[in-house]
Amino acid sequence: MHGPPLSPSGRRSSALALTLALALGPWTGCSSGGKEQRGDSPQQSAAPRKAASEGSMSAPARAEQRIGQGPAVTARSRRRGSKGSNPLPPRSDGAHRRGLRGAPARGPAHSRRPLARRSRRTPSPFANLRVLARPKVRQMIFKHWGVNPTIDTAQTQLSTFGADLDTASFAIARGYLDRGQLPPEAAIRTEEFVNAFSYGYRPPRRSALAASVELVPSPNRRGYHVLRIGLTARAPTRRRDPIHLLLLVDTSAAMARKGRLHQVRRALRLGTSKLLPADRVTIISFADRARVALRATPGSRRATIAAAIGGLTPAGGSNLIAGLKLAFRLATRAPARRRRMVVICSDGVTSRGASATRAALRAASALLSKEVALLAVGFGMGFYDDRLMEQIARLVGGRYRYVDSAREARRVFGDELLASARLEALDIILQLRFRRRAVSRFRLLGYEGRLLKHRQLRLGGRAQASGLAAGESLTALYEVKLRPSGSVLGELRVRYRLPRPRAGAGGTKSLRLTLGRASVLSSLSRASPSTRLAVVAAGFAEKLRSSYWARNLTYGRLRAMLRSIRPTSSMSSRAELAALEKLIRAAEGLDRRGDRYARHLPLSRMTFDRVPVRR
């Protein structure tokens, strides 16, 4: 039955409430999921409404799949209700999105009948207005590389992976946490959390690289030890070689969103302010097409460089592939007497399809000489393609950074930019050969996207591995289960190439280090500050991506371990450690996911050797 007739003021209030509800509605957001796919990049449009957020899990993690985790809900399945995807969970206010099959349309924004006929009470015109709600970060594209399995040495003794100096994953997670949101699991790459900090390893004096190891009992995996491997390049000299910077800037219309291009311009002015007269700068911009905004210009002409940077304006589409080809072609033509470096500043969103992107990347990687350093820097939170930026850096052996704040921009462009162009070792590949008599099982923490075939170590030529610049270091962690016998645990082998300015005609070098039982410590408290910091950083990443091995590790334990570290002068500062503790505390307050394995295997019966597979 219909209610009593409304007064004129009641009708106006009802119409106003209906207009506000239709205009505002529930805020929506999408994040990356864990849908299992191969690593092909999806077709991505520059328009925000066509961007899709999705993740994938690689094949090495199939044997240790997550228990009880169904297929992910992607942006397309949310809109169309595609088969095989989980239904959208109900929101706290009971509202559902339109277009979901089988989902009832509730709330004033989805009602087919007039609002006045549904209730005798006239709702407030501001009933659906969320003043305090914070919008979710939308349309972030990540690729989930999975989680490395635990390997029995009876099956294989070898573990081979390429060096990775990226830190973008840590900065992206920090951007999420600073906004009061838990980062997606696909955005977490453990090795990038670990390598986001400085550990103060002792640099070599004669050779290009030096390695160090340390083993401590694992804080969360019973019966296992954490093997910390530190690799560092020789210290930089006071006098550096001339550098040729090729700045590739995304000037598409999407870069106007939230002042992204303005942030790029400020960062580039900071990066070019420390150039010497012998240095050169070339600026390439790309939108619908790529063009040279500034030809090779001496570093002393700061006004000309600043004017070219200030003249970059956003307009048109995003043809990132054309920009890559032009930048790589100019880099290979530049004189080799200068250290050449391509710097990409973009949000990673391109208007080209997935197949064209893959073909162009292969062609661009063939043009790029391995004597050219590459730095991919991402800007923007929301409508951002992390997968493509990471793929570009990995394919050509470069490094990937992400700018989430002015402080990070100063670190990347003010401190690291010119230093990272002075490569001391290229194509670094690490391989561990464990002794079966001393080690029964092992697991590599992170580097899922950098795993290589074991024969790659003895082959020359290119590899999808980063290089180390002067003064830089690389850290890798293993979880190993030791046997009581055997004095030698294994052997570390490192293969790398020297740059031509250092070796004349270049050449492949190797480094070997024996892992002895004498490097095993009795407790974590006896470990060096660098090892303890690496363990905390890796544990934080494993916790954020819901790794099975971190289910018994609490955020409070991580904060306690972090507070006990007394950093040395060459390590990350106390302020950086305090900022990490703040992030751990923020994640602790936001993490309401619970233990996804508890229903199938309670924590009291947790096995520390293998992930139980649900059959």
Image: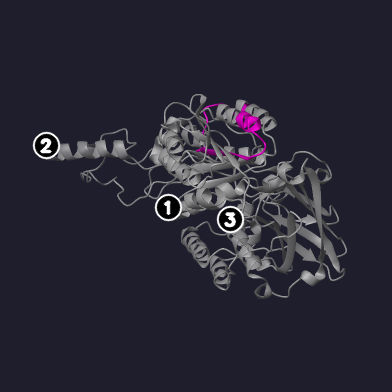
- The first of marks 3 and 2 along the sequence is 2
Classify mark 2: helix, strand or loop.
helix
Residue 598 visible: no
* C-alpha span from label 1 to label 2: 44 Å
Say which label, 1 or 2, has the lower sequence index: 2
The label nearer to you, 3 versus 1, is 3
Q: CA distance from mark 3 to mark 2?
A: 63 Å
Which residue is nearer to you in this view: 96 or 190?
190
In this figure, which colouring scheme has been used for the structure?
one colour
Q: Quadrant of residue 599?
A: bottom right
Identify the residue at image location x=30%, y=36%.
23
Q: Residue 128's quadrant in the figure?
A: top left
* Residue 8: assigned label: 2
Q: Secondary structure at mark 1?
A: loop
Q: Residues within 10 Å of mark 3 (few under 14, many from 20)?
A: many
Query: Vertical placement of 231 versus 25: above or below?
Result: below
Disc 3 to disc 1: CB gap under 8 Å: no
Which residue occupies the extreme left position in the image?
A: 8
Q: Nearer the viewer, mark 3 or mark 2?
A: 3
Label 1 sits on what residue type? Answer: Arg
Residue 488: tell me if it is visible.
Answer: yes
Which residue bears the numbered disc 1?
179
**Tally of marks:** 3
Which numbered circle lies on residue 196?
A: 3
* Span highlighted in magenta in the image: 328-355
Q: Residues within 10 Å of mark 1 (few under 14, many from 20)?
A: some
